[in-house]
Amino acid sequence: MTAVKTTETAAPAGDIPPALPPAVTGGARKRRRRGGAFDRALPYLLLAPALIAILWLIGWPVVSVFVTSFRQLNLGELVRGEIVWTGFDNYVTVLQDERFWDVSVRTLVFTVSVVVASVGMGLGIALLMRVLTPWVRVALQIAMLCAWAMPILASTTVYQWMFDQNYGILNKTLVQLGFDSFAGYSWFSSGTSTLSVVGLLIVWQAIPFLAFSLYAGLVGIPRDLYEAAGIDGATGWQTFRAVTWPEIRSLLMMVTFLSTLWDFKVFAQIWVFREGGPSGESTTLPVLQYLEGIAKSHFGVAAAISVLMMVILGLITFQYLRKLLQTEEGKI
């Protein structure tokens, strides 16, 4: 009985598929390996054109500036096409110049002041937009968009008119309010007052981006957290410190970092106002670089200043990345 069942269930010998030749199976494996390697390389191949373009548009100018900083490249060498290598002489010239250190300190103080003011006001407006009624919030956002869309030179010219010594609306308004000492007052008589006006302009231009970015972060905070804080009896400041601050801290650090990079390199506003004056008291590192390179045709010295600026910005970037990587998933 058992033998019969075994005979009935056994598969006929003719139904067994023939074994494939080794050459066929080996070729399939090779094709799979080739296909897998191509699939892994495909993303890099697709990114290669963009990467090459970025390296060409950004990397090559950086390399060119670095190489130029080791050359004596004045107007004469530029016209004659001569290449005169001077080693670190340009860096020695820059670092031994007391004006460079004065300008560097002024640039750092100016940058820190502007960044603190713009980020602080941007955060305040972002918090304000969270509690405003929809129509008021939309009106405020439209006003900020108009300010943000205004060209730099146009807004700088408007500020020049506002702070004009004889015809400025600010002096006239202050006189009408009873401050007669501001009649004919010059807001550009010193480097400190000039940079203060420029800083006010830069803050006004930076607030829209900062406010919109931080407001986007505030909108993403769950309302349940605020409700729980209210149930616990937390005050407004306690709610901000326990709920809002932890949620937007990483975003706030990012926009602060970006503002530092942008404000450190400000040139157009300072140059349009007083070209670094009066008597060079409002000169910052970008203006000094322009004066050495374009005005005096000392391109090697200007390139050395550019490299030193990149070193400073590199240190700032390193500190930002170091703090970003100290905590899990980049949350500070």
Image: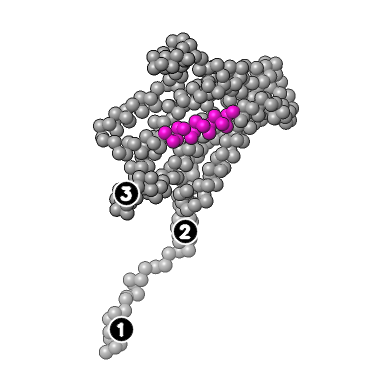
Q: Residue at x 30, y 50 (%)?
A: 230
Give the number of the disc on residue 6. Answer: 1
> Is residue 122 something that shows in the picture?
yes
**Residue 313 appears in which quarter of the rendering?**
top right
Are circles 1 and 3 on residues that touch, CB within 8 Å? no
As drawn, 209 above or below 222: above
Q: In the rendered structure, which disc, 1 or 3, sits on the residue that comes first in sequence? A: 1
Residue type indicated by callout 1: Thr
Q: CA distance from mark 1 to mark 3?
A: 75 Å
On the image, the x and y values in percent for residue 167 come to 44, 10
Q: Is residue 5 shown above or below 278?
A: below
Disc number lying in front (1 or 3): 3
Q: Quadrant of residue 154?
A: top left
Residue 88 location, quadrant: top right
Q: CA distance from mark 2 to mark 3?
A: 59 Å
The vertical placement of 77 against 42, above or below, is above
Q: Are marks 1 and 2 in contact (CB under 8 Å)?
A: no
Which residue does the numbered mark 2 point to in the structure image?
A: 29
Q: Find the residue positioned furthest to the bottom.
A: 1
**Relative depth, front residue between 193 and 40:** 193
Image height of 297 relative to 232, above or below: above
